Image (cartoon, rainbow, N blue to C red):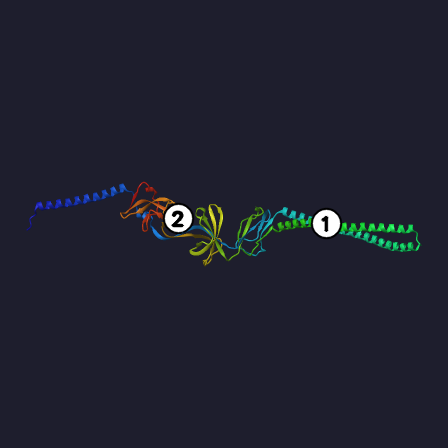
């Protein structure tokens, strides 16, 4: 039978204690190393940061902006006179023709001015007709007097000729002949004066009637203007299309020249994008664009860049070159990306947080030891989501895109 040996049992316990001790020391050493590492470099979880790889190739620069679809054929309807909105005759979405009344306005002063102008024009027309009749009558009277004088002169001419023959035959005294000759000369002078009076009267008639006619035309123009103001109280669409917007309400007072409605012709749509002023320096007509309409991307081309800045943005009109999704309509919201430049054979990367294009910025670049080291990188031009790399990185380098400002005091960060 086996006999228990106390010394062997004791040695087994000693070996067990040694193994446990060595394992404990190893664990303490590992924990100590980790603590030491963490105490020398801050750490960040890889799942908490975004990392991207530097690429080389064609760098496409683009800008992005929100916007909406509008009709390419659109007009604003403006108030032609100061007035109050009496009735809205149509609502947005209504189909209208050019002559459709869309808004009814009131202004008693406009109607009063029309009545006064119409009355003054009618009175001026009457005065002109009376003046013309009077002047024509005076001219006819002068012509009648001229005709009578001519008749008397002709009669005296016959009498003078007969008296001369009688004088030559000695049957008429010379004194009697001279009386007849003097009377003939008097009538010839009277005839000349009568002719001059007729000519002066005819000339005066022309100038007086011209002045009177000018006054009539002036008052007629005023009456037409007042009539146009009165007609403007019934606002017409001015073009065939769909009412897109009415900017006034019943009872509201509006001034002349104010936009009160917008009419658009259905069919061809364009996009109006609002691009931030800081990104608009390189925008130009003819640049390609992509419009996100719902879930569909539609190609387009810039047709016009408005030079004016409004609320920090530039208005850009884009023609649509592709088929639109079913149900697309005016005023629908869109997002657009416009390609402004293409740079071949350059380094670029997704844009890190808190960097400034065209300047040098600190970036954390990943190394092979599970850490990221801070390096100075010079960036060039930027795009919507990417930025050009000019110096400090090479193709294939991986960098941290996330905000690392909390580690600004450390040149190296451990990535777990």
Residue that appears at 81% across and 52% down = 146
Give the mark, 1 or 2, whose residue is nearer the N terminus: 1
| Secondary structure type for disc 1 | helix
Residue 264 vertical position relative to residue 11 in the rendered view, above or below: below
- Image coordinates of residue 291 in percent, x first then y, are 44, 54
Question: Mark 1 — residue?
Answer: 207
Circles 1 and 2 in contact, beta carbons < 8 Å = no
Q: Is residue 111 left or right of residue 392?
A: right
Residue 123 in view in this figure: no
Q: Position of residue 50 (x, y in %)?
A: 34, 48
Judge from the rendering whether residue 359 lies leftward or rightward of residue 163; answer left or right: left
In this orientation, which residue lies closer to the viewer: 199 or 104?
199
Dot 2 falls on a residue whose secondary structure is: strand
Tell me which residue sits at (25%, 41%) in the image: 36
The residue that disc 2 covers is: 381
Q: Front-most of 338 and 77?
A: 338
Q: CA gap, disc 1 to disc 2? A: 76 Å
Q: Which one is in front, 189 or 278? A: 189
Q: Nearer the viewer, residue 174 or 367?
A: 174
How many residues crowd mark 2 within 10 Å: few (<14), some (14–19), many (20+)? some
Q: Position of residue 250 (x, y in %)?
A: 56, 48
Q: Residue at x 81, y 51 (%)?
A: 192
């Amino acid at each position: 039978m086996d006999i228990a040996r106390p010394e062997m049992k004791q040695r087994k316990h000693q070996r067990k204690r040694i193994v446990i001790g060595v394992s404990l020391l190893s664990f303490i050493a590992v924990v100590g190393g980790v603590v030491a590492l963490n105490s020398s470099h801050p750490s960040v979880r890889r799942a908490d940061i975004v990392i991207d790889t530097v690429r080389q190739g064609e760098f496409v620069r683009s800008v992005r902006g929100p916007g909406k679809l509008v009709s390419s054929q659109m007009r604003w309807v403006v108030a032609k006179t100061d007035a109050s909105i009496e009735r809205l005759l149509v609502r947005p979405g209504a189909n209208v023709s050019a002559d459709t009344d869309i808004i009814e306005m009131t202004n008693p002063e406009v109607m009063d001015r029309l009545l006064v102008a119409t009355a003054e024009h009618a009175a001026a027309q009457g005065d002109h007709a009376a003046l013309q009749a009077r002047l024509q009558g005076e001219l006819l009277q002068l012509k009648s007097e001229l005709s009578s004088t001519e008749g008397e002169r002709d009669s005296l001419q016959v009498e003078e000729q007969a008296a001369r023959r009688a004088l030559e035959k000695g049957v008429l005294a010379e004194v009697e002949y001279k009386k007849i000759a003097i009377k003939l000369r008097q009538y010839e002078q009277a005839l000349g004066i009568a002719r001059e009076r007729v000519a002066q009267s005819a000339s005066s008639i022309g100038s007086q009637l011209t002045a009177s006619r000018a006054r009539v035309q002036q008052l007629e123009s005023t009456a037409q203007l007042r009539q146009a103001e009165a007609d403007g109280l019934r606002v017409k669409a001015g073009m065939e299309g769909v009412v897109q917007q009415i900017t006034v309400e019943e009872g509201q007072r509006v001034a002349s020249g104010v936009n009160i409605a917008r009419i658009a012709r259905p069919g061809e749509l364009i996009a109006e994008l609002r691009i931030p002023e800081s990104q608009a320096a390189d925008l130009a007509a003819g640049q390609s664009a992509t419009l996100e309409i719902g879930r569909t991307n539609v190609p387009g081309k810039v047709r016009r860049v408005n030079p004016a800045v409004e609320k920090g943005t530039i208005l850009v009109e884009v023609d649509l070159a592709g088929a639109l999704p079913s149900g697309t309509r005016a005023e629908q919201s869109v997002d657009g990306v416009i390609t402004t430049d293409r740079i071949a054979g350059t380094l670029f990367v997704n844009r890190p947080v808190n960097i400034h294009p065209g300047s040098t910025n600190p970036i954390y670049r990943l190394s092979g030891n599970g850490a990221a080291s801070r390096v100075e990188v010079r960036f060039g031009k930027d795009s919507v989501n990417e930025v050009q790399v000019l110096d400090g990185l090479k193709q294939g380098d991986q960098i941290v895109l996330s905000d690392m400002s909390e580690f600004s005091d450390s040149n190296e960060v451990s990535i777990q």
